[in-house]
Amino acid sequence: MNNATTRLVPGSAGKLAAHVMGSEGAPAVLMSHSILASSAMWERQAALLAKAGFYVVAIDTRGHGESAAAPAPYTMDQLADDVVAVMDGLGIDKAHYIGLSLGGMVGFGLGINHGERLLSLVLCDARADAPAPFAALWDERIAAAKDGCVGLAESTASRWFGAAFLAAHPDIADQFRNMISNTSSAGFIGCARAIQGLDYLGDVEKIRTPVTLIVGANDQPLPDAMAHLQTRIPGAQLEIIPGAGHLPNIDQPDAFDAALLRHFAKFAPR
């Protein structure tokens, strides 16, 4: 990410890349991305929050971006433990956490199992369970990635943004196709197996950290899934971003940023 310093932190699967911006003495905000992406997808929001006075730590998930990949499979609890390892490695006692898609799934695990390390959660376009039809979708994608993730680039980008958005924004289209293509097979397959084993829905009532759920209105079926999660997580707020798909921070950034700033105005007033 531009204007960020990269720190490599030891984790159980190898080095984890943490891209930091802002003052180390400020309240920390951790950011976690979707599968087949990297912390680069948070560049705009990381700069926004650093300017607002936070110490921003955008983490590359194991096997993605600049983080090392361990052999597949992984579990969601292991991915949550990676986040805690980054906190420990950087000397962060408590932090706000923002996660989208896979990063949001990891956030449910953090809220359930590591709530004492959290100040607040922003969980975006994510579900907390993997019913059989959803889990089965990943088998075909895993098979396609055995020899690399290049073959997933076009279908994944189209699913995230839609063909019309990609055609209208060729720079973004190229950025995300490259990001997807450059993801390691082990990293993708390991995280996909973690998604297939996702099983936090029965425990989300245990989350006591302040939570804002954000979802793109067009990211079916996630608006309904996240509306249901709002009813189960004590005090959770729900923000639906009109006209947005699976990555609302990219395709509707102004509306997403406004929702993000509303969260921090409420739970981390400056």
Image (spheres, rainbow, N blue to C red):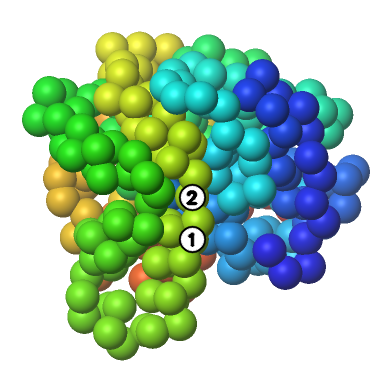
Residue 191 in sight in this render: no
Residue in the foreground of this view, choosing between 218 and 18: 18
Q: Position of residue 150 (x, y in %)?
A: 37, 58
Please report contact status of discs 2 and 1: CB closer than 8 Å, yes or no: yes
- Foreground pick, 132 / 185: 185
**Residue 20 visible, this orientation:** yes
Crowding at mark 2 (Cα within 10 Å: few <14, some 14-19, many 20+): many
Q: CA distance from mark 2 to mark 1?
A: 7 Å
Q: Which of these two is toward me, 8 or 119?
A: 8
Task: Give the residue at x 19% y 28%.
Answer: 135
**Residue type indicated by callout 2:** Thr
Please say if 237 is above or below 151: above
Q: Which quadrant of the structure image shows residue 158?
A: bottom left
* Count of numbered labels shown in the rendering: 2
User: Quarter of the image containing the N terminus?
Assistant: bottom right
Residue under pointer 1: 179
Q: Position of residue 251 (x, y in %)?
A: 37, 71
Q: Which mark is residue 183?
A: 2
Q: Is residue 258 above or below residue 19?
A: below
User: In the image as oriented, which residue stretches furthest toward the left?
Assistant: 133
